[in-house]
Amino acid sequence: MSKITEDKAVHPLKKRGSMSSISSHEFWRKDIHGRNKDSVSTVSYTDEPSLRDDVSRLTVQMENTYQLGPTKPFPVATVNHILKDVLTNYLQKEEYEPELCRQMTKTISEVVKARVKDLMPPRYKLIVNIHIGQSSSQSILIGSRCLWDPKNDTVSSYVFRNSSLFALANVYAVYFE
């Protein structure tokens, strides 16, 4: 292909947003009759992002680490101290009132979650459950069931009592492979 013919073929494609690879890569192949044929490849592009481009930007592709266990264990003793500290500070002088305790469970769970996240090893997922109830000579049984790996997953728990209420705090740490 001559230089003039090549320039004429590439010029309109450049205007529309396509680039030809004639100048940098030329491919030669033989047709059935033994004559050489040249092929031209083009790449099209647009300046306006499409919806598909936005979706592909939102997904994060991570490479496999082949890591089957945590690099360091979950700090159960430290989390127990955090639970004791938070429950004692928030509930020591409180009296049981249903609406107040409802708000306190939300507040305490967020505070515990924030403090535990600061010392979390990577790839652990947290679940924080807080139960607050009235303490008046009745009994209560609170149970939980989970499907987990006993080598990597763990739970930390603390029970607080004062004259009018009790509180149970559980922090489940589940390793995400």
Image (cartoon, helix red, strand yellow):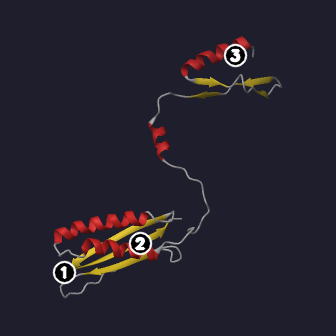
What residue is drawn where x is 36% and y is 74%? 83
**Do callouts 3 and 1 mark residues in contact (Cβ within 8 Å)?**
no
Where 177 falls versus 36 (above or below)? below
- Residue 6 is labelled as 3
Quadrant hosting residue 84: bottom left
Which element carries disc 1, helix, strand or loop?
Answer: loop
Q: On the picture, is 95 further left or further right than 116? A: left
The residues tagged by marks 1 and 2 sit, at their Cα atoms, a distance apart of: 27 Å
Q: To which residue does mark 2 refer?
A: 172
Q: Earlier in the sequence, mark 2 or mark 3?
A: 3
Q: Which three-letter amino acid code belongs to the residue tagged 2?
A: Tyr
Which element carries disc 3, helix, strand or loop?
Answer: helix
Q: To which residue does mark 1 refer?
A: 164
Q: Which three-letter amino acid code belongs to the residue tagged 3?
A: Glu
- Where's the C terminus, which quadrant? bottom right
The residues tagged by marks 2 and 3 sit, at their Cα atoms, a distance apart of: 67 Å
**Do callouts 2 and 3 mark residues in contact (Cβ within 8 Å)?**
no
Q: Residues within 10 Å of mark 3 (few under 14, many from 20)?
A: few
The residues tagged by marks 3 and 1 sit, at their Cα atoms, a distance apart of: 89 Å
Q: Residue furthest top?
A: 4
